[in-house]
Amino acid sequence: RNRNPSGASTTQSKTTMEEKASLLALFEEYQLSEEQQRLFDAMKGLKNMPDYFTHLDDEELIWAVVVETIGMDKPTSSDLRFYGRKIEERLRRLGSAESQYGWFSLKWTKPLMKRLIRQWFCGMLVIDPDIQTKNGQPIQFVREYYGDDSGYPGPDEQTDEWKKECMDLYALMARSICRAYPMSTAKGIVSFSDMQNFDWDKYDMGTKERNANIGSMIPNKLYRMITFHPDKKMIKFYNDMTPSSRKKFGFEQYDDFQSAVAGESNLLPDAEKLPVFVGGANEVNILECMKYLFRREPDALSLLLETHAEMEVAGELPKPKHMEY
């Protein structure tokens, strides 16, 4: 048999060069500092890790590094050791993320996609790639809404199956956001929520409790939470919080849209760039936003387009008053 060791070596060298170029491109895309790159290298060499660790791709490893080092500035050697421990802990928690939420194995299904489409077309959580904070963070725009067309059931119809679907939808959407929006992990997400249609009687308070630990397991970081149009109960909750607690959670509450935009002027774009359904003037194309969400997931993108087309033909696409534009 003919052997060509030099040819094999050339192929191996080319593969190594391509891998290195791919990794450098990821470092650039996620805007990793030299210190963060060093932490990545240290995590890559971890020993005695769970089996799933060997199957993580470089991007998934980067997620753990950047989400644990948001705000890291001129770290000392001691600081880097601290961050290294925090990142390793997060990586080890991915096993729990899989066992509890199916972080690696969960797939989009038609019922879940249909539910997601309803939510986005009601403005219940929308991310537009063309609207970012002045720091380059993605913004999730939320119009709290529980009308019948949203598909949100009343308390008596909130079955165990429906609650499980809530958790699955949360995990799947978080994973898709990580893939589509690198800055959601590198810099964190900013939430901008209009609370005027919030329904205390209908909202399932157990949702937050069931998802309480998910943020420590998956690389999804809420950097700042901005709400407006609060009711008396929300105002009391906010006033009962200490300033340090508000700062810790990045939580700020305003009377209305105008005061929220003015109060967050150092962070938010101008009012006319914000979506109509939260009080701005931007007529956001919801389907295009969803297509961007799945731009790196071909199967999910195909399912989105198929499900959307079916819902459109069947007249099932919701269009509440605040989405009429």
Image (cartoon, helix red, strand yellow):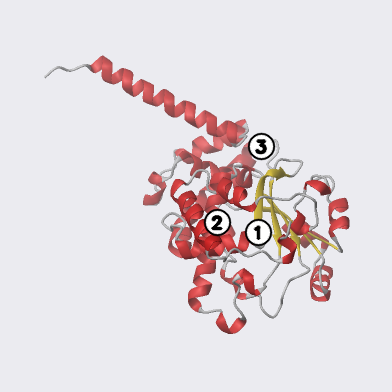
The one of 177 and 293 positioned closer to us in this rendering: 293
Q: Are marks 3 and 1 in contact (CB under 8 Å)?
A: no
Question: Could you tell me how far apart the alpha carbons at marks 1 and 2 are, in whole angstroms?
Answer: 10 Å
The one of 81 and 238 positioned closer to us in this rendering: 238
Using a 10 Å C-alpha cutoff, classify the residue at mark 2 as few (fewer than 14 neighbours), some (14 to 19) or many (20 or more).
some
Kind of residue indicated by mark 2:
Met
| x and y, in percent, of residue 174 in the image | 56, 55
Q: Residue furthest left?
A: 1
Using a 10 Å C-alpha cutoff, classify the residue at mark 3 as few (fewer than 14 neighbours), some (14 to 19) or many (20 or more).
few
| x and y, in percent, of residue 217 in the image | 53, 57
Q: Quadrant of the N terminus?
A: top left
Q: Circle 2 sits on which residue?
A: 173
Q: Circle 1 sits on which residue?
A: 125
Q: Nearer the viewer, mark 3 or mark 1?
A: 1
Q: Is residue 64 visible?
A: no
Rendered image: mark on residue 172: none
Q: Are marks 1 and 2 in contact (CB under 8 Å)?
A: yes
Q: Nearer the viewer, mark 2 or mark 3?
A: 2
| x and y, in percent, of residue 209 in the image | 60, 71
Q: Is residue 235 visible?
A: yes
Above or below 74: residue 180: below
Assign a secondary structure to mark 1: loop
Kind of residue indicated by mark 3:
Thr
**Residue at x 14% of width, y 17% of height:** 2
| x and y, in percent, of residue 75 in the image | 67, 38
Q: Quadrant of the C terminus?
A: bottom right
Question: Could you tell me how far apart the alpha carbons at marks 3 and 1 are, in whole angstroms?
Answer: 39 Å
Q: State which tag comes first along the sequence, 1 or 2.
A: 1
Assign a secondary structure to mark 2: helix
Q: Circle 3 sits on which residue?
A: 76
Q: State which tag comes first along the sequence, 3 or 1.
A: 3
Q: Is residue 164 left or right of residue 292?
A: left
